[in-house]
Amino acid sequence: MDEQRKRTAVSSFVRGRSRRRRWSPPSPRPAPPTAAASFADLPFDVLARLAAPFDVPTLWAASTVCQSWREALRPLREAMVLLRVGKGYKRGRGPGIGRPNPHRALEYFLKGVDRGSAPAMVDAGLMYWEMGKKEEAEALYRRAAELGYPAGQCNLGVCYLEADQPKSEEAVKWFYRAAESGYASAQYNLALCLHKGRGVKNDLANAAKWYLRAAQGGNVRAMYNTSLCYSTGEGLVQNIGHARVWMKRAAKGGHSKAQFEHGLQLYSSGDMTEALVYLELSTRAGVADAVGIRNRVLQSLCQASRDHVMLRVERWQPL
């Protein structure tokens, strides 16, 4: 028995020695971190392309990052000045500008284009579009769109929709890019395509979602359509209260049909003076259905109230 125990002890000792850890060389130490790259290391052409869609506050903020950026962004800052002068000529406003001068405006916009400004590309494109030069307009919109400028993407989508041979699917692609960035006009156009099935499968629920987002972004036509969706329950859960809120906002924003509908609501509630304001506005905008009710409300008010309403209409400005 004792002999057996000795054998077991010796065997355990031998196995223990065989399981000892073998020596291995130490792992190499990690290399020290390299110094962080400087903002100034960004190539000028890359920086100019990234900054091309910037608005004035963002461009000036970027110009204060470092001296290198300030120098690189100088052409875009110059383009913003040229753009402001061009808009002055387009509207006929500004020092030394007596009346609108579209050709002079285009000249300044194109100078901004030469400096790589995406907003200048869109403004020059708009001028060409108004002159009937749609190919030139589309080319400038495409340049702005490829630089990531939402207004250029939206306008390029409109070009594709209104072409002699519409490219609806391509239009939807550009509308979607601009809509995702929060551009309300693109959100409205995307909603229309989804609503009517242009370039994409008809999807009323998704259309209503984009109408609402565009309305929240300030698009007046989207406000009107959002009101209709809430009123009928198409694409949105029916909610008459929400429908009235959005109809009122669209009316205040200058949508003529919304002014007529809001005027009817006010007329039904007995607020004749306020109803006449919106019925008169919609009548002047060419809504034929508003004329008869407008005349009926006029007859129900005294002369002083009529004069007061007409004065308000003359001074009225969309919100």
Image: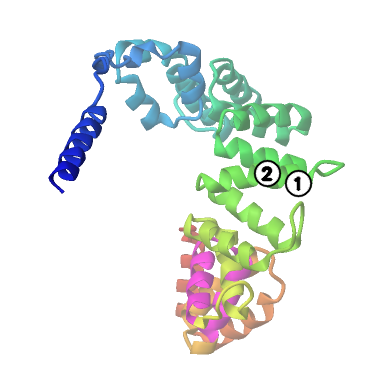
Foreground pick, 60 / 1: 1
Image point 65% across, 53% down: which residue?
190
Image point 53% across, 63% down: which residue?
212
Q: Amino acid at mark 1?
A: Glu
The label on residue 83 is: none
- Report which residue position mark 1 lands on: 169
From the viewer's perspective, is 202 left or right of 14?
A: right
- Colour setting: rainbow
Foreground pick, 155 / 179: 179
Residue 245 inside the magenta-drawn segment: yes
- Report which residue position mark 2 lands on: 173
Estimate the x, y position of residue 135 in percent, counting from the top left. 78, 29
Q: Residues within 10 Å of mark 2 (few under 14, many from 20)?
A: some
Estimate the x, y position of residue 69 in percent, counting from the top left. 37, 15
> Furthest-left residue in view?
2
**Disc 2 element:** helix
Quadrant of image for the C terminus? bottom left
Relative to 139, is 210 above or below?
A: below
Question: For the magenta stretch, what is the residue range?
Answer: 241-267
Q: Amino acid at mark 2?
A: Lys
Residue 17 inside the magenta-drawn segment: no
Residue 178, quarter of picture: top right
From the viewer's perspective, is 146 left or right of 85?
A: right
What distance separates the C-alpha of mark 2 from that of mark 1?
6 Å
Foreground pick, 109 / 21: 21
